[in-house]
Amino acid sequence: MKPVLFCLTQAGADLARKLNGELHGYRPRVGGADVVFDDATAHLAALFKAGRPIVGFCAAGILVRALAPLLGQKHSEPAVIAVSADGKFAIPLLGGHRGANRLAQHVAAALGGQAAVTTAGDIALGISLDEPPPGWRIANIDAVKPVAASLLAGENVRIDGDAAWLAALPQDETAQTTIRITAQKPTAGDSALIYHPPVLAVGVGCERGTSCEEIETLIAATLAEAGLAAGAVACLVSIDVKSDEQGLLAAANSLGVPARFFDAAALSAQEPRVTAPSDYVRATVGTASVAEAAALEAVGAAGTLLAPKRKSARATCAVAMSPVPLDASKIGRARGHLDIVGIGPGSDAWRTPEASEALAAADCVVGYGLYLDLVTDLIDGKQRFETGLGHETGRVERALDLAAEGRRVALVCSGDAGIYALATLAFERLEAGSPERRRIAVRVCPGISALQAAAARLGAPLGHDFCAISLSDLLTPSATIEQRLRAAAAGDFVVALYNPASERRRSLLPLAREIFMAARGADCLVACARNLGRGGERVAIARLGDAWVESVDMLTLVLIGSTATRAFAMGEQQRLYTPRGYAAKETP
């Protein structure tokens, strides 16, 4: 989970941008934040309750006073770091048992400062016994404290098993205090501090639609029969045609490990090592083994099959062990993810937290260059694929291909991704595409569309029924556009006109003006909103009979009011709204 960079001042935000995290800024003082807040104490409390790591670019006292009422179990509290105003010191305040010391060291290294670690074990021993390396797990957390106390008292420890990260501890094979490194399930009464290294790969094959409960039960039974600990599982592995199998993905999530996938060719190469090849499986998915072959492929040539294939009604499971800890990120391929992200008009304040999270989580981004430039702070350092206007299909194809390779991709759109943007094209290509593409995970992250942004600037012109029509005849015949304009005019909708005019397309906007003037009269209100949420923003209210058409371009949204839409002055500003009838209904 990426840390929240909590900033109360612009200077703090400028310093925080040197780190990789989600920037949260105090609205009155911080510009360009991913998330803004007005109440610092309430915002900190909400982040802490959600388990988000917090790096506060503010006084330590602010963090302490805000979070003190929430303190409970130290083993479940998220990391909280205070960074001095000059960036010279990163102080872990809470969550030393949840990565705070390591996070402070990372922050200090990035800022050229120093981590002020205060926990005795880290200072005296050079490591944190309750914070093993990624993938490693502690079987009995309560044993950490007495072992640490013995070491701090000057005693030696006996280490059974291999753990290079513990090599600096004072060791003696005759010591009473013991640390055990094992993939085996602990036995009752064992007083040793037990670590499970990530050395097991659980291979799973299943029929389409197999439930998570069945797969979880089968995995648990397979591990138990072999005397193996779930804490030593590094990954759940299977064949790539199962990369969208929801029960399998949920089982991996339940184990707290990633799901990784291999193609049939890779699994076929393991056939000499499997114990129960199946002609039926070969005919179905192109390889004679899934569970055993996937587990063996994951652990490599030096690994061994510890638990041969075990069956349930609709699934199979096998377990293999590696002689060294496994890095799951380098095994097979992950399920690809495509986030189709609407970034709104471009203003940071008008970008949703979900959109910011999707951009920050992506390993590559695809989009029109101008839109990518608007989110540079969130995608800096990521692989970037950009195209010009008019290359929408190529953009979507590239995003889908990258996701099908197992990448986490953000396809960036202006406004809302599903309103005159690329979400619809992406689903069109998915429907017509290969099975590999259909197995990726797709999420659409909504954004503020131009019609919403324009309405907010104007007042409330969308208070009653409205519709949107694009005047671009590049994809829609002019006759169809005219038909829709006449229908909207007859229906007395408030109408948002997208893509109203370009250098080459100038005829449909005057036609739209004529159609609506004929239906609503020359005094009907119209608004032109240009560059909303960006530099050079301009919003103007006119009447259909006025001369406004020539000022419109592709960066403008035109909003035509209904016969009920009204305008009135508030000081020097004209406000526009369309009543829905509340006042009339409530009149005695």
Image (spheres, rainbow, N blue to C red):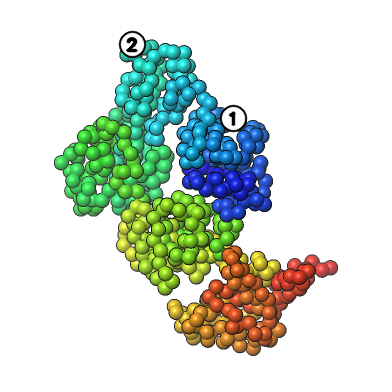
Q: Quadrant of the C terminus?
A: bottom right
Left or right of residue 144: residue 568 = right
Is tag 2's residue or tag 1's residue first in the polypeptide sequence? 1
Residue at screen point 62% across, 51% down: 30
How many residues crowd mark 2 within 10 Å: few (<14), some (14–19), many (20+)? few
Give the residue type at disc 1.
Gly
Q: Quadrant of residue 516?
A: bottom right
Q: Secondary structure at mark 1?
A: loop
Residue at screen point 76% across, 73% down: 568
* Mark whose residue sits in front, 2 or 1: 2
Q: Position of residue 346 (x, y in %)?
A: 55, 62
The residue indicated by pointer 1 is 72
Give the residue type at disc 2.
Thr
Mark pair 2, 1: CA separation: 38 Å
Q: Is residue 79 visible?
A: no
Q: Is residue 126 above or below residue 319?
A: above
Left or right of residue 138: residue 113 = right
The residue indicated by pointer 2 is 174
Q: Secondary structure at mark 2?
A: loop
Q: Position of residue 245 (x, y in %)?
A: 36, 50
Left or right of residue 255: residue 569 = right
Q: Is residue 276 above or below residue 495?
A: above
Q: Could you say which is closer to the camera, residue 377 or residue 510?
A: 377
Residue at screen point 33% across, 27% down: 164
Q: Could you say which is closer to the camera, residue 539 or residue 195?
A: 539
